[in-house]
């Protein structure tokens, strides 16, 4: 029981740390870049001026969508790795259990 409490405390600490850990992702060869933290919050979106074509806004929308989705996927992977480290292999994955910040 004590080990479970320690693991829970470590996981809570990791969750707090995930607020400050970030990943970057891009789409369109770097035309759109996003920064996402380990709690799956989009912190920043950068769009190169050359990506803005008023006659083809759907292309820019697609690039933003792709970059955001890629950033979220990478942040999820990072968060899962950090949580696995916190658990130290003591707790097997439980199907259907969604920890906050780990969609």
Image: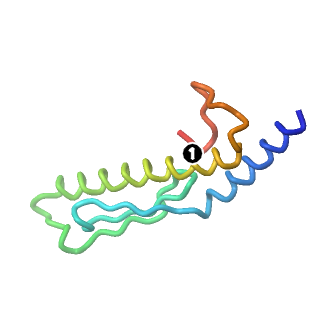
The residue sitting at the top extreme is 95
- Quick check: 59 above or below 98? below
Q: Residue at x 34, y 65 (%)?
A: 33
Q: Residue at x 30, y 56 (%)?
A: 64
Residue 20 placement: quadrant? bottom right
- Pick the residue in front: 78 or 98: 78
| Left or right side of 44 for 101 | right
Residue 17 location, x and y as percent? Answer: 67, 59
Please give the residue where the numbered disc 1 appears in the rendered image.
Answer: 80
| Left or right side of 75 for 17 | right
Q: Residue at x 70, y 44 (%)?
A: 88
CA neighbours of label 1 inside 10 A, class few (<14), some (14 to 19), many (20+): some
- Quick check: 21 above or below 83? below
The residue sitting at the right extreme is 2
Residue 98 location, x and y as percent? Answer: 60, 33
| Left or right side of 12 for 74 | left
The quarter of the picture where the N terminus appears is top right
Residue 58 location, x and y as percent? Answer: 18, 52
Q: Residue at x 83, y 44 (%)?
A: 6
The residue sitting at the front extreme is 89
Question: For numbered disc 1, what is the local secondary structure?
Answer: helix
The residue sitting at the bottom extreme is 49
Residue 67 location, x and y as percent? Answer: 33, 56
- Quick check: 42 above or below 2? below
- Check the image and tell me how it is coloured: rainbow
- Pick the residue in front: 85 or 64: 85
Tally of marks: 1
């Amino acid at each position: 029981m004590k080990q479970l409490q320690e693991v829970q405390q470590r996981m809570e600490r990791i969750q707090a740390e995930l607020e400050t850990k970030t990943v970057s992702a891009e789409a369109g060869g770097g035309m759109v870049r996003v920064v996402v933290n380990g709690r799956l919050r989009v912190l920043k979106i950068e769009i190169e001026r050359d990506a803005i074509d008023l006659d083809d806004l759907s292309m820019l929308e697609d690039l933003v969508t792709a970059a955001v989705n890629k950033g979220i996927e990478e942040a999820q992977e990072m968060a899962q790795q950090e949580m696995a480290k916190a658990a130290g292999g003591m707790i097997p994955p439980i199907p259907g259990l969604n920890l906050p910040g780990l969609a």
